[in-house]
Amino acid sequence: MFTFIIRRVLYSIPVILVASFVLFWAVRSTFDPLAKLRQAHDPSVIQREIERLGLDRSIVEQYFLWLKAFVTGDWGTSSRTGSPVFQLIGEALWPTAQLAFWGLLVAVVIAGAVSVYSAVRRYSLGDNLLTGASYLGIAMPAFWFGLILIQTFAVWPKEQFGLAEPPLYFVGLHSPGESGFNLDYLRHLVLPVAALMIALVATWSRFGRAAMLDALSSDYVRTARAKGVPRRQIIWRHAVRNSLAPFVTVVALDAAVLIGGLVVTEQIFAIPGMGRLFLDSLVAGDVFVLLPWMIVVAIAVVICNLLADIGYALLDPRVRLR
Amino acid sequence: MSAEVLLEVEHLSIAFPTETGLARTVEDVSFVLHAGETLGIVGESGSGKSMTAMAIMGILPKSAIVTGSIRLRGRELLGLSDDELREVRGRRIAIVFQDALAALNPVMTVGDQLVEAVRVHRPDLSAAEHRARAVELLALVGIPSPEQRMARYPHEFSGGMRQRVMIGMSIANEPELLIADEATTALDVTVQAQILDVLREVQARTGTTVMLITHDLGVVAGSADRVLVMYSGGVVESAPVEPIFYDTAHPYTAGLLASLPRLDRRSRDERLFQIPGQPPLPTAWPAGCRFAPRCRHAIAGRCDVAVPAAVEVGAGHTAACVRIGEWQEEAR
């Protein structure tokens, strides 16, 4: 198992390198890093920048120049704000990571519970209701659902009951002056996490239900029944454990998409995370932020894939042979 | 047969509602199992032999409509609750399934699955005793270095070894009745012989009654005391093992025997005999004898009128055919 993990980790390194080169090449050939300077009418400034970035050299040389700076933490400065990119991304990564962590955690728990319930009570009223709800969840745009949540759980009760402040907040992750894990933090978290997880729960529970049904109709479950194993143990020891591996794979792969895809949720709830940083930088044409941003997201995707692989191998002994 | 009766199956019928109508998989099957004997149940796929086994185990899908009676030492099993049946399953009646790779849980070690089989019925024993029993079972079915094999997963075993594990698991609580449902079907001939040996040893050791379900008459010839031949959900012939082969009373049994490859009879280029046609669909059974549409000896007006009743043709030998005696003449 240990060598399996080491091997998978080593495999990820060339993947990240190739991905970063492709991104670098794509960004360099579509964005002009000198766009802003061109208006200055001062050829010496442009010339200096060309030399600094090595723009007169081949794309491969430029890439290695950039890579060397990148791995040493020199990510350049933002042309939009003038602050170091490393710091910008670091600051944006933290709220996004929190949001993603809580969103994934809650979504996994709810989707798991719904999967088991729906599969065990297949075609019951509860299963049918959950099936209907999940289609709704998949179909509902995240921004719209977020706005509905804000209206229902923050704005409406505040006005209706004449409260000093809404029961749940919808701006940022902390009130001014507050920090750390406290009630204030939780009151900020509920709505964005709910908006974020609804689509995940909807798709994962569909997937988990199918995996559970598959396991419940399998030969080994029939064997367990023939052994006289109680129903509860059949469900948890046999069926759930077997459907965990495919479930975890889907979760890990979706988690990767989530890191970069929090744009809408962060926008609605005014959370200064990666999604907002990307939008702001894109609008400003800030190529110095966009490239490292994409590399960071690419690394996150690779890490999630890695975790999916390792998780699958931990849960299914048949995979470890390969 | 003076031995005491272990299992009585009477007028057992199993049907499933489908979109194209009621699918009858077993219809009016009756037989008796005596303690200590080996009963072979022979028939092709879809003849209802596995359904009968699953009905005895009480593990048919919920949608199944089951009527009749299945009594274990006089106690009715049909209609028992799931909890009551759990006391029977794995403890008094156990089953070995065909495909051991699919029938064993792929993400649990063989040891855990054996321990589970013991623990479910002996919660009074300690974990160490459960484990010791599991190791003992592996040794009993001839698995070398059982201690080390406990921590292995099913996919790390060969097909024959997996089937041994299945047998070990089934005899964990020394059941009175052991059902082997096509237990040797997916195996090589040599491994098949080994597994049958293991079954025989287990039977000699524990005196358990064995129900050997197979489509292979060769397996039955070597192992069974009595044989039940099933076709399209019904028993067409029932007899001690020798008369089945030497005094065949039903044309279907004769067809099965004729389709066996034989070294002594057939010349090299002669094609193997096969029974023409297909068994009827379970949703569309013909009136009368269900084998009649494929039977060389069927006569309109006699074979397609009513389902033939079982007729006694010898000691403990019955057959469900209206032309017993006549068809043998024709076949000569």
Image: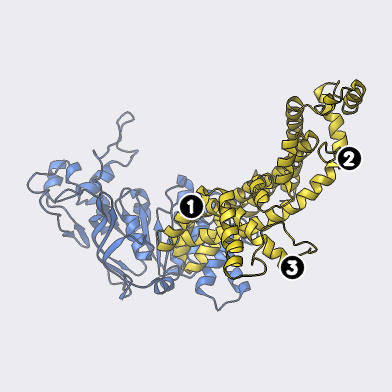
- Which circle's residue, 1 or 2, is located before the other in the chain? 2
User: Which residue lies under the disc numbered 3?
Assistant: A182
- Which circle's residue, 2 or 3, is located before the other in the chain? 2
Where residue A276 sits in the image (x, y, percent)? Answer: 71, 45
- Report the front residue among A19 and A270: A270
Instruction: Kindly indicate whether the residues beneath marks 1 and 2 are on one polypeptide chain.
Output: yes
Q: From where the camera sits, is residue B154 visible? A: no
Where residue B70 sits in the image (x, y, percent)? Answer: 30, 68
Image colour for chain A is: yellow
Q: Which residue does the image show at 30% across and 35% down from the upper left?
A: B272
Up/down of A133 relative to A280, above or below: below
- Identify the secondary structure beneath mark 2: loop
- Identify the secondary structure beneath mark 1: helix
Up/down of A298 relative to A176, above or below: above
Instruction: Kindly indicate whether the residues beneath marks 3 and 1 are on one polypeptide chain.
Output: yes
Q: Which chain does tag 3 point to?
A: A
User: Which residue lies under the disc numbered 2?
Assistant: A72
Amino acid residing under circle 1: Leu
Give the tally of numbered discs. 3
Crowdedness of circle 3 by 10 Å Cα count: few (<14), some, many (20+)?
Answer: few
Residue lying farthest bottom?
Answer: B124
- Report the front residue among B262 and A260: A260
Along the horizontal axis of the image, is B253 left or right of A238? left
Q: Which residue does the image show at 51% across and 58% down from the upper left?
A: A115
- Identify the secondary structure beneath mark 3: loop
Q: Which numbered marker is on residue A136?
A: 1
CA–CA distance in space, label 2 to label 3 = 36 Å
Where residue B62 sits in the image (x, y, percent)? Answer: 36, 62
Crowdedness of circle 1 by 10 Å Cα count: few (<14), some, many (20+)?
Answer: some
Q: Which chain is blue?
A: B
